[in-house]
Image (cartoon, helix red, strand yellow):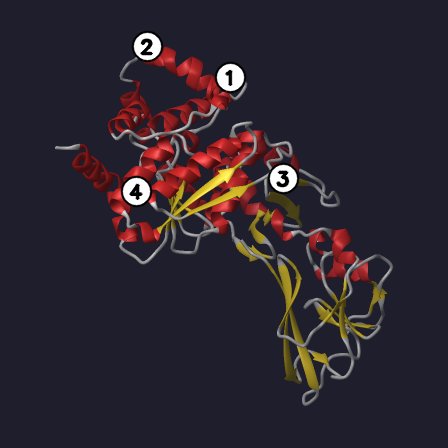
Amino acid sequence: MNTNQSSQKLAEQIFAPIEDQLSKDCKVCVAFSGGLDSRVLLELTIKKISLDRLLVIHVNHGLSAEADYWQRHVEETCDSIGVQLVTEKVTVQSAGKGLEAAARDIRYKVFDKHMAESDILLQGHHFDDQVETILYRLLRGSGAKGLAGIPKTRKLSRGILFRPLLGIKRSDLENFAKTCSLKWIEDESNKNNEFDRNFIRNNILPKITERWPDYHARFDTLIRNSRSNKRLSASIFKQDIQTLDQKQERGGHSIDIRVFSSLDRVRQKNVLLYWADSNGMQSPGHKIIREILDSLLNADEDKKSQVNFRQTQYRKYRDRVYLLDGKSFSDLEILRSQKIVWNKESRLDLDPVSHLKFDVTQGDGIRYPKKVPVIIKFRKGGERSHPSGREHSNSLKKCLQESGLEPWWRDYVPLIYFGSELVAVGDLWIQKDWEAGIKEPSLKVSWITKTL
């Protein structure tokens, strides 16, 4: 069998698990750094998928002095193949979560930008990456979920991610690349042992290889056993979440704290391990889970306690525990500085994650004298409100407390004015004397925030 035939056969094998998805009319995106693994991935991909369906994506992080050279190499490679390429230069800011994690997050934002709902993203992780990841997680105290390793496929916010090379050793990829006379770049930062993964790759793995030459088979067994345990834990979570009265909330979900507290601590940890993941958020580690159990759940009601994990927030209010998407909360100072005038459209965006929906109707909602300008403002403090059906007015702060709106949303609720007069507070209540009569022209307003 010649080189081309063997490459074609390998391509058929590695893409077999997503044959159904590939048969659909979708775009296939290849994450291409220019290194060995992504170069082999690109070579095998063009054996399987026509060039008109491919989009190669290169992210220039600017973290290396060689970053622009790598980009030129990528451009020359794609030009020689005749495949479409997009490159993006980004700025990586660690923001307290580490440079590697920050670079990863921004890469996925770039991928998401270029993908549609049915598209497929390919990445070149191989089996040695899998082993490094498991060792790294083991040293961080991960359980079965972490030791199950890198998934071969998973859903993205748009499309799916597939790693065709995950079962192949790096040495085999290098032999393939040399046989096919492929050119690739070497990232000099891979030699920097200040990064944990590099230390594992450069110092620990060689020792393991020397002592246990069949370590790949041993790790494969560990992965399979861990995935079985992970499935069992996920199954128990599905049983428990059915008892916890999970509700969809503004910006997230909530569960009943009383039922949750009745579970034993092991099952509580298991719920928190899978809850975020089941709603499309990143699962917290054991340190964050302990903080939620020990600090948040035992916090006094009047304390504004919360636990943050990346873009996820865990909060408590009354008898509920809340899982919230941190991206749902815009900059309050920017919101408070705004005075938004309704443009008569059915939808009015307030910020990137919330909007008002307007329905002009009759006898349902706010009494609507159509010539008066509709203005949206936000709390600054000192406002008063007189909800319809109450005898007396009170401070807006007190009215919001009595409404049961969660404390973290009270500064974000849109205040609806007709001219200079407050007529409604979001879709929570209408002011006294402003409820529409049966045949009166009216305006029905819905306050909609992003949900998970």
Mark 3 or mark 4: name the one nearer the start of the chain: 4
Q: Amino acid at mark 2?
A: Glu
Residue 349 in the image: state x and y as whole percent.
Answer: 65, 64
Q: Which residue is mark 1?
A: 193
Identified by mark 3, the residue type is Asn
Q: Which residue is mark 3?
A: 308
Q: Earlier in the sequence, mark 4 or mark 1?
A: 4
Q: CA distance from mark 3 to mark 4?
A: 40 Å
Marker disc for residue 172: none
Residue contact between numbered discs 3 and 2, judged by CB atoms under 8 Å: no
Image coordinates of residue 214 in percent, x first then y, are 27, 17
Placement of 139 over or under 114, stated as above or below: above
Residues 310 and 257: in front is 310
Specify which label sits upstream in the sequence, 1 or 3: 1
Q: Tell me the residue that label 2 is attached to.
A: 210
- What whole-number distance in Å separates the C-alpha atoms at marks 2 and 1? 20 Å
Question: Comparing marks 3 and 2, which lies closer to the viewer?
Answer: 2
Q: Which comes before the other along the chain, label 3 or label 2? A: 2
User: Which residue is drawn at the image coordinates 43% and 34% (left, top)?
Assistant: 73
**Which of pointers 2 and 1 indicates the residue nearer the eye?**
1
Q: Nearer the viewer, residue 20 or 250?
A: 20
State yes or no: discs 2 and 4 in contact (Cβ < 8 Å): no
Determine the secondary structure under disc 1.
loop
Specify the amino acid type for callout 1: Asn
**Mark 2 element type:** helix
